[in-house]
Amino acid sequence: MFKIDHATAADAAALTDLMHASSAYQGQYASILEGYVVTPDYLSRYAVLAARGPSGPVGFAALTDAELDLLFVADEAQGTGLGARLVRQILDVARENGLSEVRVVSHPPAVKFYERMGARQIGTVPPKPPKVSWSRPELVFSLDSWPMPGNDRAPARETAAGQGDRRRIRS
């Protein structure tokens, strides 16, 4: 079983390593992570949840403003339901901060996972060469209509599809 709690500055290096070790970002998708580092400043500015196993972090999710910015689960922990737990808990954080929508610009192979979790595709973000040479699906979780087991709270207000609420998220 994995424990999920708020990431701290001390987790920055381990979360960066976990992200770069992901087999989902090898080959054609590797360029998007080139030079990307999860910094202590990032962890203090945004709501970041870390899933911990006996040997350290095995997954994390980050909510920046009204966007699920990062979601990574170690290859060895995939298929355990950890990704779904991280999404549910980060969406709970969004609700607690008064958001009614959370945007996701998805890694193309992850679209089906987000759709199973209740997100709907609202568009496509065009490539941004040279780092991102592929289109990325844009999805949104509408928290008003996202009844997951154990989540019966309704968010405070609605926003237009895809726009989200751009307030800063408290962790």
Image: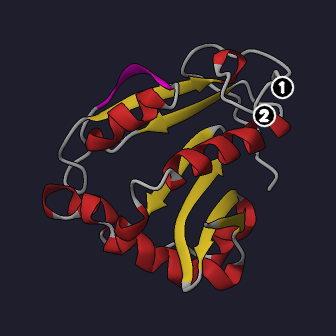
Label ID, residue 95: 2
Query: Measured from the top left, where is residue 55 in percent x and y?
Result: 54, 86
Q: Amino acid at mark 2?
A: Arg
On-image quarter of the C terminus: bottom right
Mark 1 crowd level (few <14, some 14–19, many ≥20, 10 Å Cα):
few
Label ID, residue 153: 1
Query: Measured from the top left, where is residue 59 in percent x and y?
Result: 52, 65
Which residue is depicted at the point 67% across and 46% down?
A: 90
Residues shaded magenta: 119-125
Query: Measured from the top left, where is residue 117 in percent x and y?
Result: 51, 32
Rendered position, 59 above or below 157: below
Q: Quadrant of residue 98?
A: top right
Which residue is depicted at the point 62% across and 67% down?
A: 2
Give SS at disc 1: loop
Mark 2 crowd level (few <14, some 14–19, many ≥20, 10 Å Cα):
many
Q: Is residue 104 left or right of residue 54?
A: left
Tell me if residue 123 is in the magenta stretch: yes
Magenta highlight: main SS: strand
